[in-house]
Amino acid sequence: MSPRLPPDASLPHPERFLATDSCVQCGLCLPHCPTYLQSRQEPDSPRGRISLIQALARGAIKADARVIEHLDGCLVCRACEDMCPSRVPYASLIDAVRSELAGNTRPAGPQPLESRVLRQFTRSRKLRRLVYAALRFWQDSGVDRWGTQFADALPAGLGRLHSLMPKLQKTPLIDMDAQTGMDSSFDEDTDKPTVQLFTGCAGEVFDRATLLSAHTVLMYLGYRVVVPEAQTCCGALPLHAGDETSAQALAQTNLAAFTPTLPILSTASGCGATLKDMVSWHGNAAAPLAHATQDICSFLLTADWSGIAWPKTDLRVAVHTPCSLRRVLHADSDVLALLARIPGVNTYEIARNDQCCGAAGRYMLDHPEMADTLVADKVADIARTAPDCVVSTNIGCSLHLQAALRRAGHEVEVVHPVTLIARLLPPLATTNDVA
């Protein structure tokens, strides 16, 4: 959602916001809202934003720049939902109001270049591969060093984007399977249990190593891994930006791409949370897919890990828990439980692990000052405790944490738990027929 909206913006479908009436204005959400804790302004709290939505729906106020700023400043971390005694569906309300305002004020004719690029990035794997190749050339040629040296001279958005770029390794995108879902033939001609891997749009560009690690670990443990070629973005980026139409189109593509009778595993908890929550924004048709979706760490807890001759290791691992894993997937303890199975891996949670790091999808691009404020405590704790590495289950959080650590002069690697596991697995020949 963009703050560049006209001052006469209003909500064309006020009936969508009847659930705001269930908010009793008790204020229990306030101590858990990251933006309110920073600004101490009521309109930056869930209660305050609900009041703004109610006033917009009644026509009592117009969506001027200040109202938009307060609504746009929400991270959608959903900490308020966990504390709400009335179970107000806050995330659905904030997504809906962004969609209503954006849809009501979007000018006719060609859309801004940024919106068109984002829409194509979420829909086109060809574009994502082109972006990956371009970024590799940018880094391998050394041109990116100029971007670092003159970051302050770049336009604000480009400078920020450059600061978040990870060092891309020469990692191929895992092979895709041409079969398209809604049939159960994936597991024919094999007695191996079959799972489906969700790649995600950002994952295909910035997190190929994690996707490859997930594929490796699953196959090591005896699973057949299907990666449907027809899959696409989970829909989180357009959904939280107010573009419901694009999010719905992506949902339809994924519903056709996956087989709902087989597990759908996500390596990015943000993607997994969006898929798991699809019924709330796409309707009951999405229920089978939502039910089949699991975070890969949660799924791996159910696997048979017996017989693995783990090499001797001694690692201190700091665990970051994304809001999507904690608030939506409710699997915040699964990473700790999974890594506890590996001898010599000692884990601890970083400070204020129950509060948003500020990444929140593209929030870290649109609201860099707030995003950097929210991650500062986590960076300070990582610097103080000096772990061997940090693990996080969400690509956006990992990019944000890694960039913040880099800016602070700390060379601590941030990886996905499954990447750490893949690195520590012994050669398959030394196990007792694990696969």
Image: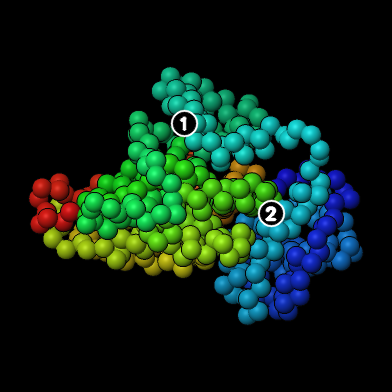
- Left/right placement of residue 17 relative to residue 142 reads right
The C terminus - image quarter: bottom left
Residue drawn at x 37%, y 52% is: 196
Whichever of labels 2 and 1 marks the residue nearer the N terminus, that label is 2
Image mark for residue 369: none
Residue 362 vertical placement versus 100 (above, below): above
Residue drawn at x 87%, y 66% is: 58
Please identify the quarter of the rendering in which residue 209 is found: top left
Which residue does the numbered mark 2 point to in the structure image?
73
Q: Nearer the viewer, residue 179 or 84?
A: 179
Q: SS at mark 2?
A: loop
Query: Residue 166, can we see it?
Result: yes
- Left/right placement of residue 19 relative to residue 346 reads right
Q: Colour mode?
A: rainbow
Residue drawn at x 36%, y 63% is: 298
Going by the numbered disc 2, the residue's amino acid type is Gly
Which residue does the numbered mark 1 point to in the structure image?
129
- Left/right placement of residue 2 relative to residue 191 reads right
Q: Residues within 10 Å of mark 2 (few under 14, many from 20)?
A: many
Residue drawn at x 15%, y 46% is: 427
Going by the numbered disc 1, the residue's amino acid type is Arg
